[in-house]
Amino acid sequence: MPYIEAHTLERDFPEHVDIIKQLYEENLEFKLESERYHQLDKKIRGLEAAGVTTDDQNYNSLKRLRVQMKDQLYQQIIDFSPAHEPG
């Protein structure tokens, strides 16, 4: 089975690792959404490793959902970031 690199939040947003860890520890909603995101990523990587075709509708809808979830998590990270203050 080929190795498929995980799309972790820490890997994709290395400049926000400290904030991600803090949110994960302090914000239950972020923690649960993050865990669902990582479970979905693992499922997608399993399909990729199994050689699912790229025109598979289920596979593509899962990938779209992963992007949506990552966007929502990223927005929470940015909103929490001390560098991002409304003004």
Image (spheres, rainbow, N blue to C red):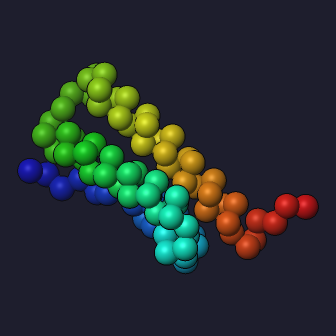
Q: Relative to residue 17, is residue 45 depicted above or below?
A: above
Identify the residue at horizontal 20%, vertical 39% (top origin). 47
> Is residue 17 something that shows in the picture?
no
Residue 21 appears left or right of 48 = right
Q: Which residue is farthest left?
A: 1
Q: Relative to residue 26, is residue 70 depicted above or below?
A: above
Identify the residue at horizontal 55%, vertical 67% (top origin). 27
Q: Which residue is farthest front?
A: 28
> Is residue 60 something that shows in the picture?
yes
Place of residue 68 in the rendered image (x, y in percent of width and height, measured from the top left) = 51, 40
Q: Relative to residue 3, is residue 18 depicted above or below?
A: below
Identify the residue at horizontal 57%, vertical 48% (top origin). 72
Place of residue 28 in the rendered image (x, y in percent of width and height, measured from the top left) = 50, 64
> Total number of numbered labels?
0
Q: Quadrant of residue 7?
A: bottom left
Q: Quadrant of the C terminus?
A: bottom right
Identify the residue at horizontal 52%, vertical 60% (top origin). 30
Residue 70 appears left or right of 3 = right
Q: Nearer the viewer, residue 64 or 55?
A: 64
